Image (spheres, grey):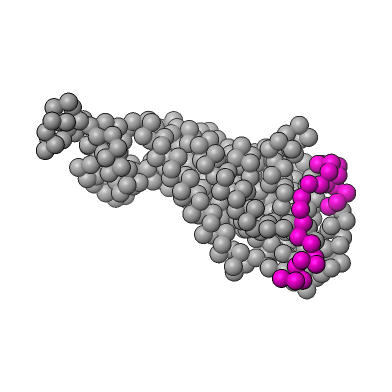
């Protein structure tokens, strides 16, 4: 994240902070031609190429090493970039992948897409704020992130870090996600994400902010405990967000006993207490919470059949009473759909 912060400062932050918090003395206020510069010295965080800062990098009382400036910039980058990534790729997934017939499902909510976007938009600032302290630890050297393969454990690790990261974070997300389903926690934190019984890609980030942050903790814990190439870290952060969208896209491609794809995650949204894992079915199998997706979900003609929907709705209605009590969702009535 230090390279992302450096590039953001170079093209945006230096100008913004020089304007908002100029490094001026009382004498400079009398003479606008004289600009006081900071004593900060530039040292690139990027070992591969350097973008030299402009003069504005030296013209703020808050230089690039100021922790308050770093916190504000990292928060904004996480919020803005997170929203762009969410909205652009969820929209592309909805347009080109999501099966629109799912909107006819009896448990699809009235105005669901708008509600999903509204929930995600409201939650992203909170999730970004809670994530910012971890970025600060990273950019100030309090993790085991390294710059180049030569600084890592070895060339062998450059490939193994990816499956290692997936397995480690998958295990912790399983535990956290299952904990979020505890009766004392579920209604306060995780229920907003389970509002969507038949989710669309826009449900991918539609969490309570503390819920979304809690499930992201393993990604930040990993580089505190284990070495990780910092460029791999950024790539994995983007991948994690893509994967979150993909498991909500309703396109049941991965009929796999290992991969926890969209079909497995649909089982979780329909039936609540199954398939807590993020990437694999390993931890659900070990924790006796794995539920194999129905075979019909992998056949386009059958997955949207009325018989399939009736069976899903019937079982979901029984489970929602056990988990939540009264079902306070407002469903899109079939009659209104036929009129659209």
Q: Nearer the viewer, residue 111 or 128?
A: 111
Horizontal relation, residue 182 to residue 206: left or right? right
Q: Quadrant of residue 152?
A: top left
Tell me if residue 292 can be seen.
yes
Q: Residue at x 78, y 73 (%)?
A: 301
- Coordinates of residue 38 in the picture (x, y in percent): 21, 31
Image quadrant where one finds the C terminus: bottom right
Foreground residue, 11 or 259?
11
User: Image height check: is 258 above or below 46?
Assistant: below
- Is residue 193 located in the magenta-colored stretch of the structure? no
Region rendered in magenta: 316-340
Name the residue at the bottom extreme.
301
Question: What residue do we see at 57% from left, 59% from top?
Answer: 90
Quarter of the image that includes the N terminus:
top left
Establish if 247 lies above or below 133.
below
List x then y, in percent, for residue 257: 74, 56
């Amino acid at each position: 994240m230090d390279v992302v912060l450096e590039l953001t400062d170079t093209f945006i932050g230096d100008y913004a902070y020089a304007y908002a918090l100029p490094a001026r003395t009382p004498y400079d206020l009398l003479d606008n031609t004289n600009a006081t510069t900071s004593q900060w010295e530039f040292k690139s965080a990027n070992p591969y190429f350097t973008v030299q800062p402009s003069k504005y990098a030296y013209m703020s009382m808050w230089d690039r090493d100021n922790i308050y400036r770093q916190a504000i910039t990292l928060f904004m980058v996480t919020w803005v970039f997170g929203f762009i990534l969410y909205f652009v790729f969820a929209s592309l997934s909805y347009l080109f992948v999501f099966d629109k017939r799912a909107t006819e499902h009896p448990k699809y909510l009235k105005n669901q897409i708008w509600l999903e976007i509204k929930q995600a938009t409201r939650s992203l600032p909170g999730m970004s704020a809670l994530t910012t302290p971890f970025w600060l630890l990273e950019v100030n050297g309090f993790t085991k992130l390294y710059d180049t393969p030569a600084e890592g454990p070895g060339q062998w690790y450059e490939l193994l870090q990816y499956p290692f990261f997936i397995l480690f974070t998958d295990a912790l997300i399983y535990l956290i996600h299952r904990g979020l389903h505890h009766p004392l926690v579920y209604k306060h934190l995780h229920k907003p994400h389970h509002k969507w019984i038949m989710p669309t890609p826009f449900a991918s980030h539609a969490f309570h902010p503390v819920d979304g942050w809690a499930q992201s903790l393993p990604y930040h814990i990993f580089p505190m405990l284990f070495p990780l190439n910092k460029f791999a870290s950024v790539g994995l952060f983007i991948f994690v967000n893509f994967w979150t969208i993909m498991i909500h896209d309703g396109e049941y491609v991965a009929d796999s006993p290992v991969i926890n794809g969209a079909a497995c995650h649909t089982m979780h949204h329909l039936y609540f207490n199954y398939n807590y894992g993020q990437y694999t079915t390993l931890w659900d199998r070990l924790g006796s919470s794995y539920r194999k997706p129905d075979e019909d979900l992998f056949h386009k003609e059958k997955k949207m059949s009325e018989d399939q929907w009736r069976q899903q709705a019937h079982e979901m209605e029984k489970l929602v009473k056990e988990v939540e009590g009264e079902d306070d969702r407002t469903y899109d009535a079939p009659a209104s759909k036929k009129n659209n």
